[in-house]
């Protein structure tokens, strides 16, 4: 099974760790009661530059992508050191494979703390205690970014909020951008209390009909903001992500805080 696992590590992380990661993930997959294919593992660092022997004053970011019985899944975990990061990745992969093979059920809320704060955003306006969340796992908190370092244009899938929530869970996202057929507008589902799932659209609209997911609903449409104004709002409130609409096209966008402290932008393709 190990030869079916592709592992990519950043400069400064030993090849020995890459071999350990391959063996560990292969062992997890070998015990699965499902067909698991296309396994790709990535290991990188957060914060300070890595030293020759491992990671010096930096965190570790790990990610695995796979297909389980034909369904795409992703697990992303961060930790203070290589060993803990691999432990979390293996545990997360095991749980995600079980969920994919047995059928979706809502995830509990709140989740255990990750290195990036997962706190109410979009319509709450509440400050996010990101420094505290990062400190609990012993990682340095990155400086607040002032610009977007990665952009992605996506052809949004037309699907129900239920389907969007299931995709969000399977791919280990905290927020997922899609197009809602009921309103023919762009929308997001994201992880927040009290139920763990919330729906927001670019225009005000009523709740979906008989959702299977325990959704709460944002009563307001997404604010229309330029990219600069969105960056200002996210950084001023210390939010992990922000859903907004382009002032010209009205299409949905998600600005999010990356693990490395930079900002990423996902925009609906025209």
Image: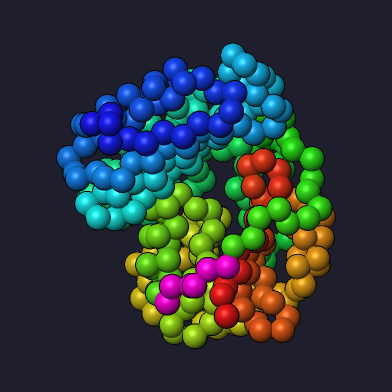
Looking at the image, which residue is at 51% across and 19% down?
14
Please provide the residue range marked out in magenta.
153-158
What's the coloring here?
rainbow
Nearest the viewer among 48 and 223 is 48
Nearest the viewer among 201 and 192 is 201
Q: Position of residue 159 (x, y in %)?
A: 40, 74
Looking at the image, which residue is at 69% across and 27% down?
49
Q: How many marks?
A: 0
Reply above or below: 109 against 210.
above
Furthest residue in direction left, as rendered: 33
Q: Quick check: can you spot residue 195? A: no
> Does the magenta segment cover residue 230?
no
Q: Position of residue 61 (x, y in %)?
A: 55, 35
Nearest the viewer among 226 and 100 is 226
Reply above or below: 163 against 67.
below
Looking at the image, which residue is at 78% across and 48% down?
145
Q: Is residue 157 left or right of residue 244?
A: left
In which quadrant of the rendered image does the N terminus lie? Answer: top left
In which quadrant of the rendered image does the C terminus lie? Answer: bottom right
Q: Position of residue 105 (x, y in %)?
A: 32, 54
The quarter holding residue 54 reads top right
Look at the magenta stretch and give its main secondary structure. loop
Q: Position of residue 63 (x, y in %)?
A: 47, 39
């Amino acid at each position: 099974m190990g030869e079916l696992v592709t592992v990519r590590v950043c400069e400064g992380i030993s090849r020995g760790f890459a071999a350990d990661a391959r063996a560990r993930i292969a062992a997890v997959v070998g015990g699965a009661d499902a067909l698991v294919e296309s396994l790709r593992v990535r290991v990188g660092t957060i914060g300070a530059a890595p030293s020759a022997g491992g990671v010096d004053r930096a965190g570790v970011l790990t990610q695995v992508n796979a297909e389980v019985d034909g369904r795409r899944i992703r697990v992303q975990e961060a930790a203070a050191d290589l060993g803990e990061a691999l432990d979390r990745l293996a545990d997360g992969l095991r749980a995600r494979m079980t969920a994919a093979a047995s059928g979706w059920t809502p995830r509990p809320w709140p989740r255990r703390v990750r290195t990036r704060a997962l706190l109410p955003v979009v319509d709450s306006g509440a400050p996010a205690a990101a420094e505290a969340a990062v400190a609990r796992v012993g990682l340095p908190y990155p400086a607040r970014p002032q610009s977007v370092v990665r952009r992605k244009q996506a052809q949004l899938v037309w699907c129900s909020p239920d389907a969007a929530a299931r995709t969000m869970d399977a791919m280990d996202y905290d927020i997922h951008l899609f197009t809602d057929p009921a309103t023919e507008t762009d929308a997001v589902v994201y992880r927040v209390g009290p139920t763990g799932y919330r729906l927001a659209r670019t225009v005000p609209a009523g709740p979906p009909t008989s959702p299977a997911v325990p959704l709460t609903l944002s009563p307001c449409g997404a604010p229309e903001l330029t990219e600069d104004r969105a960056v200002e709002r996210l950084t001023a409130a210390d939010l992990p992500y922000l859903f907004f609409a382009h002032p010209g096209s009205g299409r949905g966008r998600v600005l999010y805080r990356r693990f490395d402290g930079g900002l990423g932008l996902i925009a609906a393709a025209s």
